[in-house]
Image (tube, grey):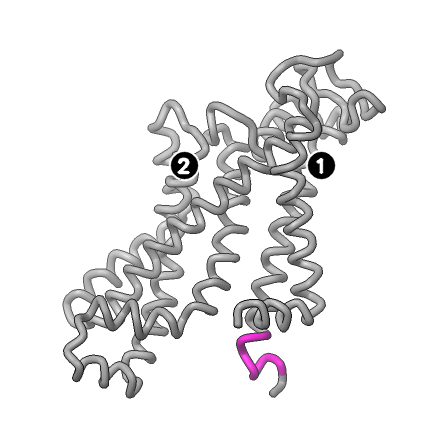
């Protein structure tokens, strides 16, 4: 069943290309460092050398190999994006589902909190939280992004639940004596899996860009290398003005490629699961 679904989705050209790009970048991040065994934090050559046979993407001001930093940065950024997306997905789904199903005071309270957080720019919340933490590892940065990125999903899930809970199968479960949690988990959430997965794809893209944004303003990870950190130091050392293109173009291009592929995949999935968008 799952294999058949995947094959059908791959028939959509947009989805196939997007998945191909994503797989390629994931392989770069996880297999690249295994074959290109250069320490991304150590000075390995002369500073600011352009790409060459010895240094395929050149070196930065500190003599560090940029290819090694980009490969390790891909893995870190993917880890942060995935973990942050999962955290936001869990919080948003739980809050939205409980608010929509329970209704009444519970719905009003959760929706009020969600809307307040939704109106407050999430990037400002991320900056405020990150600025108060002196040491930030990838897991902590992912947590910061995840706990500030869920309000929009919660509101969307709530609206879906409000519609689904009026269906006949929900009434049958209530008559059978199922608890609210069981109804939500066994009846409502399974009917939203395609929608939730599409939203996770968007959360993943947004989290990776958020990590880059935090790093660019100096509140990203304090230990390790991410694509955002590579761009931060390129910015700090004025690489753009000085024409050191090999420093900022590769990480920037990879971020754009990942985000674009994830957004295109989300659109393709939306088209697949929505007959109206396919013109059927």
Residue at the spot of label 1:
250
Highlighted range, magenta: 272-278
Question: Which residue is at the far right?
Answer: 53
Disc sitting over residue 170 in the figure: none
Name the residue located 62 percent from the left edge and 85 percent from the top edge.
279
Residue 245 figure quarter? top right
Q: Residues within 10 Å of mark 2 (few under 14, many from 20)?
A: some
Name the residue located 59 percent from the left edge and 72 percent from the top edge.
4
Name the residue located 71 percent from the left edge and 68 percent from the top edge.
13
Q: How many marks?
A: 2
Between marks 1 and 2, how big is the CA–CA gap? Answer: 26 Å
Of residue 38 and residue 200, the one placed in the foreground of this image is 38
Does the magenta segment cover residue 274? yes
Q: Is residue 137 rendered to the left or right of residue 46?
A: left
Q: Is residue 63 rendered to the left or right of residue 121?
A: right
Of residue 217 and residue 174, the one placed in the foreground of this image is 174
Which numbered disc flags the more N-terminal residue, 1 or 2?
2
Of residue 160 and residue 42, the one placed in the foreground of this image is 42
Name the residue located 23 percent from the left edge and 84 percent from the top edge.
171
Point out residue 38 in the picture as x, y percentages from the top left corner. 67, 21
* SS of the residue under disc 1: helix
Q: Main secondary structure of the magenta part?
A: loop
Against 199, is 22 above or below?
above
Q: Residues within 10 Å of mark 1 (few under 14, many from 20)?
A: some
Disc sitting over residue 127 in the figure: 2
């Amino acid at each position: 069943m799952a294999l058949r679904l995947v094959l059908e989705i791959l028939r959509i050209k947009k989805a196939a290309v997007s998945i191909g790009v994503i797989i390629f970048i994931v392989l770069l991040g996880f297999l690249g460092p295994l074959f290109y065994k250069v320490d991304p934090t150590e000075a390995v050559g002369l500073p600011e050398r352009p790409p060459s046979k010895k240094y395929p993407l050149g070196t930065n001001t500190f003599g560090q190999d940029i290819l090694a930093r980009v490969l390790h940065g891909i893995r870190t950024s993917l880890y942060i994006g995935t973990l942050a997306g999962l955290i936001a997905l869990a919080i948003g789904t739980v809050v939205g589902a409980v608010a929509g199903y329970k209704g009444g005071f519970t719905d009003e309270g959760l929706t009020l909190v969600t809307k307040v957080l939704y109106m407050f720019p999430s990037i400002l919340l991320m900056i405020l939280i990150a600025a108060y933490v002196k040491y930030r590892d990838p897991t902590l940065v992912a947590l910061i992004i995840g706990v500030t990125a869920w309000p929009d999903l919660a509101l969307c899930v709530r609206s879906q639940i409000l519609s689904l809970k009026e269906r006949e199968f929900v009434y049958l479960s209530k008559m059978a004596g199922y608890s609210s949690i069981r109804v939500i988990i066994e009846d409502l959430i399974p009917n939203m899996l395609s929608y939730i997965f599409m939203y996770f794809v968007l959360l993943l893209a947004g989290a990776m860009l958020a990590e880059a944004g935090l790093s660019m303003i100096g509140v990203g990870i304090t230990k390790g290398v991410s694509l955002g950190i590579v761009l931060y130091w390129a910015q700090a050392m004025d690489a753009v003005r000085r024409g050191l293109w090999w420093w900022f173009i590769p990480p920037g291009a990879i971020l754009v490629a990942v985000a674009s592929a994830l957004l295109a995949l989300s659109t393709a999935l939306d088209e697949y699961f929505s007959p109206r968008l396919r013109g059927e």
